[in-house]
Image (cartoon, rainbow, N blue to C red):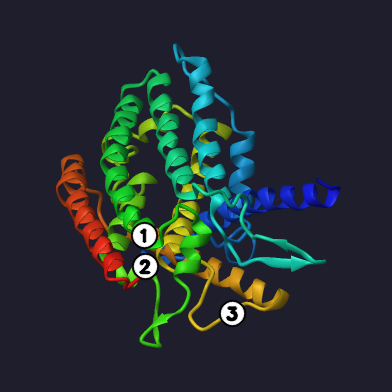
Amino acid sequence: MTFTDWAILALRVLVPVLAVLSFVPLITWVERRGAGFIQDRPGPNRVGPFGLIQPVADGLKLFFKEDVIVHDADRFLYILAPGIALFTAMVTFAVIPYGPELTVAGRSIRLVGADVSIGVLYVFAITSLSVYGIVLAGWASNNKFSLMGGIRSSAQIISYELAMTTAAAGVLLATGSFQLTDVVAMQHGTWLGFLPKWNAISQFLGFVIFFTATFAETNRTPFDLAEAEAELVAGYHTEYSSMKFAMFYMAEYANIIVSSALTTTLYLGGWSLPGFTPRGLVGVLFSIAVFLAKTMALVWVFVWVRWTVPRFRFDQLLRLGWKIALPAALVNLLWAALLARWKVV
């Protein structure tokens, strides 16, 4: 491989990671500002115009706060846990395509970190590891509230991962491939000349189940039982401070971005639009903008739901996962099989 090939490969890997990291502060501002509007108050509006520099101020505050390690904590695991949480959140985006192929100086560059043939399996494998960061944080903190939060998180992720993967299996069945670029390509075009050929339309039940499960996977309201301030103080990260707490905070918002991007790819056509074929650099940039717009719309739904819907009880959360979401996902899988048999998709 030439130097140019290595440079292109490095950029393909670094661009998604840096994009997620740069969007995390913006999403924290969107959440706080959106919460203010929903609750009929200003939200952050002092540091910078419209409070836009507030995330920078918060980051500096956390960076300079005292880093406390509690007495009798398992020091190695206590330090390792936030690293696992942030690492798994960042590397998941590597296989998600965020644009079409870009041709530069005769070279065709795929706008995806790694266009591997097992893209969906990679995503689910990495996201299943994220629970270890939370469980280790709860166990290593030597705090009963933290331990309870970690146990809750492991139970709810097991409950909802089954429904999530079963719902996604319907998309894979229709596509005939685990490669996410193939999933996007399959959703090009329209039905009846005007209806987007998106999986969210042909498999609407699967879309609802998958997107609902992402709330449980990211420990967000109404499934934030791993934190549950009312009864567990702050759950698994009760004993964390300074940058270790910031890493958990960043991991949560990175997971929201990645979950929204994955939902966009699987169900909303990814970077494509019906009737639009990207040509040249302008077309590629427009396609990337389309992908970002769809992803940010789903991120806003996360914010909207958090400040609108109350938290479920833990028994309600598990009942929803095992008795409603999983059977419904199996029904969606049967429907997807019928669509594939009838060659509708």
Residue highlighted by disc 1:
171
Provide the secondary structure element on which disc 2 rests: helix
Q: Position of residue 250 (x, y in %)?
A: 53, 44
Q: Position of residue 171 (x, y in %)?
A: 36, 59
Q: Amino acid at mark 2?
A: Asn
Which comes sooner in the sequence, label 2 or label 3? 2
- Give the CA separation, mark 3 to mark 1: 23 Å
Task: Give the label on residue 194, or none.
Answer: none
Give the residue drawn at x 45%, y 68%: 186
Q: Quadrant of residue 277?
A: bottom right
Q: Amino acid at mark 1?
A: Val
Lateral position of residue 255 relative to residue 90, left or right: left
- Give the CA separation, mark 2 to mark 1: 7 Å
Nearest the eye: 20 or 322: 322
Nearest the eye: 127 or 194: 194
Alpha-carbon neighbours of circle 1 within 10 Å: few (<14), some, or many (≥20)?
A: many
- Give the CA separation, mark 2 to mark 3: 19 Å
Q: Amino acid at mark 3?
A: Thr
Which comes sooner in the sequence, label 3 or label 1? 1
Give the residue drawn at x 61%, y 56%: 112
Asked if the residue under mark 1 is in contact with the one under mark 2, i.e. CB atoms within 8 Å, the reply is: yes
Give the residue drawn at x 20%, y 42%: 318
Task: Give the label on residue 277, or none.
Answer: 3
Give the residue drawn at x 35%, y 33%: 235
As drawn, 282 above or below 93:
below
Lateral position of residue 248 relative to residue 59, left or right: left
Task: Give the label on residue 199, or none.
Answer: 2
Lateral position of residue 270 relative to residue 336, left or right: right
Alpha-carbon neighbours of circle 3 within 10 Å: few (<14), some, or many (≥20)?
A: some
Q: Position of residue 330 (x, y in %)?
A: 21, 53
